[in-house]
Image (cartoon, grey):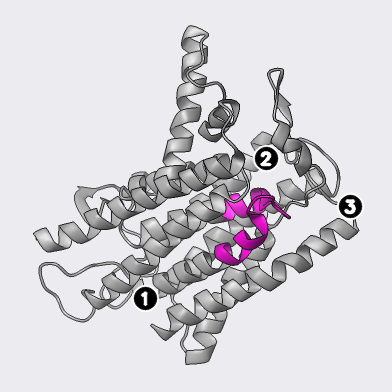
């Protein structure tokens, strides 16, 4: 447990005190990302003040997570696990893809950033390589970090062939990263929502560690490999996001950019895959799913009927155009995410009690 606290605490400090250093560096060089202040002829009055705000704040989150994870292992002198290192690989790898996009937008002033096809190829390479590696390196019990079975609160009887399992993991990672990216449209929205998700995964990791099949095999034990290290990783992610949120809450002093949103999406996907709670992500990442569904409905309806379901998608922009203030939207969406996460944890624990 001390590792979990150390990881969260160190990452929190990096987020709190490292982010302003990054802000000063970016401002000193005049690096900021273009802000959309209107769309379809409709103005966003509250977005006018965002012009000149630095982006690429996800770099502070990445440093906090990697640092928190490393410190937690150095202090107790424990070797990092394959599971933890793979989770870091996915998070950092996708973060670097996002950083390349942010770099071109901010430093090179190329408004479109990396070409869409190149960006998708980068994401696919990281996700597919992670998926293949996650199904290798069995431990002494024959367990790999990921499972070929589709999971809900634990592995289900649905076991996929190797190739289909890799494709399933790739699809899950891609969907999650894009969902977080779509949610990152208002100050603090994605970071605050992610904190609740990471906190839930930290609790799940600690619980699975205490009831793990590595210690004793009984009917309700969990097959997840290295669950305590997953809790350490999740705690580091939560701490880094909390420290970053201090500076990202409205009015934001910095945005996380694609560096942050893709990295957070990758971290959430890795935790769901490794904790054997892939489909439970519907609830633990409810805010991100809701945002994605709003975009799918909007695009689908417009292409099929020529009519829009919402005034604008993603959903948070719809409420902006209804006249809701940015802070009101963000806080209410955080409440929704908390309810989603609470329901997800209830389903997770309820399965244990029921069985």
Task: Of the two numbered discs 1 and 3 on the same chain, state the one appearing first in sequence.
Answer: 3
Residue named by callout 2:
118
Task: Of the two numbered discs 2 and 1 on the same chain, state the one appearing first in sequence.
Answer: 2
Secondary structure state at the residue bearing disc 3 = loop
Q: Main secondary structure of the magenta part?
A: helix
Q: Say if 108 sits above or below 241 in the image.
A: above
Magenta highlight on residue 255: yes
Q: Residue drawn at (57%, 24%), measured in percent from left and top?
A: 312
Q: Residue drawn at (32%, 66%), measured in percent from left and top?
A: 204
- The residues bearing labels 2 and 1 have C-alpha atoms spaced at a distance of 36 Å
Residue named by callout 1:
228
How far from the left and from the top, in percent, is residue 115? Answer: 71, 36
Q: Residues within 10 Å of mark 3 (few under 14, many from 20)?
A: some
Q: Please identify the quarter of the rendering in which residue 105 is found.
A: top right
- The residues bearing labels 3 and 2 have C-alpha atoms spaced at a distance of 27 Å
**What's the magenta region?**
241-263
Residue named by callout 3:
30
């Amino acid at each position: 447990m001390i590792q979990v606290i150390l990881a969260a605490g160190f990452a929190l400090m990096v987020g709190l005190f490292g982010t302003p250093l990054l802000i000063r560096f970016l401002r000193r060089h005049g690096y900021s990302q273009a802000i959309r202040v209107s769309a379809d002829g409709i103005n966003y009055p509250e977005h006018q003040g965002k012009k000149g705000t630095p982006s690429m704040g996800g770099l502070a989150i990445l440093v906090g997570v990697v640092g928190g994870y490393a410190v937690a292992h150095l202090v107790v002198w424990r070797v990092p696990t394959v599971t933890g290192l793979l989770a870091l690989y996915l998070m950092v790898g996708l973060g670097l893809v996002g950083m390349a996009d942010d770099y071109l937008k901010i430093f090179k002033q190329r408004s479109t950033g990396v070409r869409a096809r190149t960006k998708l190829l980068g994401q696919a390479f990281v996700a597919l390589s992670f998926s293949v590696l996650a199904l290798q390196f069995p431990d002494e019990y024959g367990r790999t970090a990921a499972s070929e079975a589709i999971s809900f609160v634990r592995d289900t009887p649905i076991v996929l062939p190797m190739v289909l399992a890799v494709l399933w993991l790739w699809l899950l990672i891609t969907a999650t990263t894009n969902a977080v990216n779509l949610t990152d449209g208002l100050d603090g929205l994605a970071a605050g929502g992610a904190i609740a998700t990471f906190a839930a995964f930290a609790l799940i990791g600690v619980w699975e560690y205490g009831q793990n099949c590595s210690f004793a095999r009984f009917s309700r034990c969990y097959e997840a490999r290295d669950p305590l290290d997953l809790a350490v990783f999740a705690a580091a992610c939560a701490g880094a996001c909390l420290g970053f949120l201090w500076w990202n809450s409205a009015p934001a002093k910095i945005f996380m950019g694609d560096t942050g949103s893709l990295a957070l999406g990758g971290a959430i996907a890795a935790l769901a895959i490794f904790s054997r709670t892939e489909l439970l992500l519907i609830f633990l990442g409810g805010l991100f799913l809701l945002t994605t569904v709003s975009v799918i409905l909007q695009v689908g309806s417009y292409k099929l009927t020529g009519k829009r379901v919402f005034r604008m998608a993603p959903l948070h922009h719809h409420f902006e155009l209804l006249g809701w203030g940015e802070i009101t939207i963000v806080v209410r969406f955080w409440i929704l995410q908390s309810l989603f996460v609470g329901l997800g944890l209830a389903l997770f624990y309820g399965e244990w009690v029921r069985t």
